Image (tube, rainbow, N blue to C red):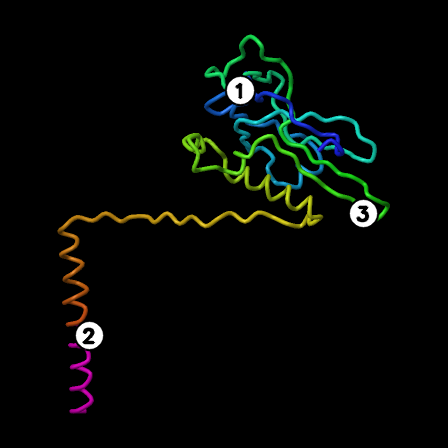
Amino acid sequence: MSEWGVSFDYGMAADDDEANYAGYKTYILAQLQENEIVKTMGVSGQQTVFPLARPIILKDKVGVSSTVLATTGENGYVKENIYSSVDSFEEGDIRKKSNLAVMLTKQNSMESRSNMFVMGTSLFWGDYSSETSQFYTLLDESANRKFCSGVFAYVTDQPSSFYIMPKNIVQDKVIINQLSIYIYTMITVFIIPIIILAWGLITWLRRRYS
């Protein structure tokens, strides 16, 4: 990705601020930047979670413009040892604010351009099969999905795209006791049919002898 002026830093982004991480300090509640791309996503005031993300390094490149979408907080740092069992800041780690997601635009000509989105983690998309799936209960899934939808809309030049919330398929259960079962059974199986039969018989007799 050098032609775009972007690369990944070695290590893992983390944040010391309790308001900026979920569960582990490497599960970052990102600081969404105030720019036109983020504003179109509809995620204002919501929390997007970037688990186990590598910091993104941006360099000036002629013909390429970059827009930072999400970062760690001011108390962010980079864990140099990605295999460390400690998620807090320790010797060898580097104090710095990390880019977590960026949008790059390359002007090919006066009429055309190319967009590229770069993110420091694939777990943002929801790897529920992984051993980290227990932490996805902390995700604001709708915010992450809206973010993704906004990214797709921008890179495909379709700003009118929007995210539709999935239908909740959880079924509500009605719990009744045994007495209620007997009562409902009597009403539906015996009483209602008898009433209908009696009403029909009365109507038939009236018509016959009228």
Magenta stretch bounds = 195-210
Instruction: Give the secondary structure at mark 2.
Output: helix
Front: mark 2 or 3: 3
Q: Position of residue 84 (x, y in %)?
A: 49, 16
Residue lying at 71% horizontally and 48% vertically, measured from the top left: 157
Whether 62 is among the magenta residues is no
Q: Residues within 10 Å of mark 1 (few under 14, many from 20)?
A: some
Tag of residue 112 = 3
- Tally of numbered tags: 3
Tag of residue 96 = none
Seen from this angle, which residue lies furthest top?
A: 91
Q: Earlier in the sequence, mark 1 or mark 2?
A: 1
User: What kind of residue is marked 1?
Assistant: Ile
Whether 205 is among the magenta residues is yes
**Quadrant placement of the N terminus:** top right
Which residue position holds label 2? Answer: 196
186 to 16, vertically: above or below: below
Q: Is residue 87 left or right of residue 34?
A: left
Residue lying at 53% horizontally and 20% vertically, measured from the top left: 82
Residue lying at 55% horizontally and 37% vertically, measured from the top left: 144
User: What kind of residue is marked 3?
Assistant: Ser
Q: Which of 105 and 176 lies nearest the eye of the viewer?
A: 105
Instruction: Give the secondary structure at mark 3.
Output: loop
User: What kind of residue is marked 2?
Assistant: Ile
Instruction: Give the secondary structure at mark 1.
Output: loop
Front: mark 1 or 2: 1
Q: Earlier in the sequence, mark 2 or mark 3?
A: 3
Q: Which of 202 and 23 lies nearest the eye of the viewer?
A: 23
